[in-house]
Image: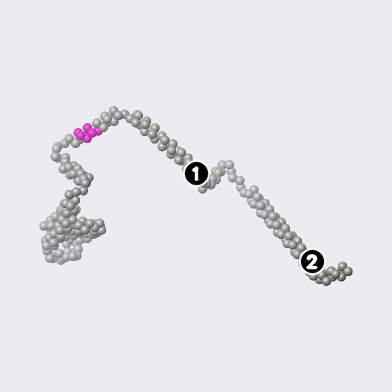
């Protein structure tokens, strides 16, 4: 009776049991595979470790005289220790400064210092009073002291005077020099090129007796005055550039003048300055 009752359920339970058996078999196979892999991995690691140990044993051993290799990059701890040692040494030197000052003051010979100072200034006074009066360059010393006092004084009434002397005066004086130099040169000698005309004559009197290139000097003087009046640093710089340009242009121009007038122009150039009378 019992078998007859459970017979209908046999078809249902049979697949379940078979599935359980299959799952158990698969689980066992997976565990065996994992064990094999683990064993192979351990074997490979063991072989690799043995290989490395063999290489280390085969490597040449350093001699006792070989220098010890030290890491070139110090660690943070080593850097901190080095910095701390430097600071301690520096502080030790700073602590000794008051003692050194006290020792220097205590051993300072005031009498010797007074004797040496008195001898020094006596020698200076003797040198100052020696020689012939008003024939030793006293004018330069007086002017030097006056200029230093003017520089050190508070700005006041002389500023407007110096502003006038450095601005409008050179501006209009330069214009006058240009006009007068062109008039003295004459139409037969005046040309914008550096090569003189074929019928030119050498001019050595008037403004040309004071400087060889008065037109260039007048232009530079006017440029300086205009830069001063306009308070323009840019124009001052451009005036310096113009001065350099005129020196180069005048040098090339004088090559043609020397070629044209020969020894006469060489003697004139040796006697008369180029831009500033008796200076440059």
The answer to which quarter of the image holds residue 32 is bottom right
Viewer-proximal residue, 219 or 106?
106
Q: Secondary structure at mark 2?
A: helix
**Quadrant (top left/top right/bottom left/bottom right) for the N terminus:** bottom right
Above or below: residue 79 compared with residue 171? above
SS category of the residue bearing label 1: helix
Tell me which corner region of the image, top left, top right, bottom left or bottom right, holds residue 248. bottom left
Pointer 1 residue:
80
Q: Nearer the viewer, mark 2 or mark 1?
A: 2
Percent x, y for residue 249?
Answer: 22, 60
Which residue: 44% across, 36% down? Answer: 92
| 2 and 196: which is toward the camera | 2
Which residue corresponds to mark 2? Answer: 17
Residue 114: % across, % down: 27, 30
Q: Which mark is first along the chain, 1 or 2?
A: 2
Q: CA distance from mark 2 to mark 1?
A: 73 Å
Residue 133 horizontal/vertical position (percent): 14, 37
Q: What residue sits 51% from the left and 48% below the top?
A: 73
Q: Residue at x 51, y 44 (%)?
A: 78
Q: Residues within 10 Å of mark 1 (few under 14, many from 20)?
A: few
The answer to whether residue 213 is visible is: no
Given the current orientation, which residue lies at the most extreme top position? 111
Which stretch is magenta?
Answer: 120-126
Q: Position of residue 274 (x, y in %)?
A: 18, 56
Numbered circle sitting on residue 9: none
Outermost residue on the right side: it is 1
- Neighbour tally class for label 2: few under 14, some 14-19, many 20 plus, Cα within 10 Å: few
- Residues 99 and 64: in front is 99
Color theme of the render: one colour
Can residue 46 be seen by looking at this rendering? yes
Residue at the (69%, 57%) spot, across then down: 41
Q: Is residue 80 left or right of residue 137?
A: right
């Amino acid at each position: 009776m019992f078998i007859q009752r459970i017979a209908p359920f046999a078809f249902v339970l049979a697949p379940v049991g078979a599935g359980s058996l299959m799952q158990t078999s698969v689980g066992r196979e997976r565990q065996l595979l994992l064990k094999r892999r683990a064993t192979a991995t351990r074997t490979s690691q063991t072989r690799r470790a043995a290989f490395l140990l063999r290489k280390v044993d085969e490597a040449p051993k350093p001699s006792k005289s070989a220098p010890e290799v030290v890491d070139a990059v110090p660690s943070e701890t080593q850097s901190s220790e080095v910095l701390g040692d430097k600071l301690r040494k520096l502080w030790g030197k700073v602590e000794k400064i008051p003692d050194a000052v006290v020792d220097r003051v205590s051993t300072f010979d005031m009498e010797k210092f007074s004797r040496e100072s008195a001898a020094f200034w006596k020698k200076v006074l003797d040198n100052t009073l020696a020689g012939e009066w008003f024939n030793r360059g006293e004018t330069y010393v007086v002017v030097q002291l006056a200029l230093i006092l003017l520089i050190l004084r508070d700005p006041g009434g002389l500023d407007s005077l110096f502003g006038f002397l450095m601005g409008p005066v050179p501006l209009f004086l330069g214009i006058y020099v240009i006009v007068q130099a062109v008039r003295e040169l004459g139409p037969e000698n005046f040309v914008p090129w550096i090569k003189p005309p074929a019928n030119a004559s050498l001019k050595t009197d008037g403004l040309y007796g004071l400087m060889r290139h008065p037109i260039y000097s007048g232009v530079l003087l006017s440029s300086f005055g205009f830069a001063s009046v306009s308070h323009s640093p840019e124009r001052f710089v451009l005036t310096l550039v113009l001065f350099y340009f005129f020196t180069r242009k005048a040098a090339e121009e004088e090559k043609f003048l020397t070629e044209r007038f020969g020894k006469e122009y060489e003697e004139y150039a040796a006697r008369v300055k180029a831009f500033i009378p008796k200076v440059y």
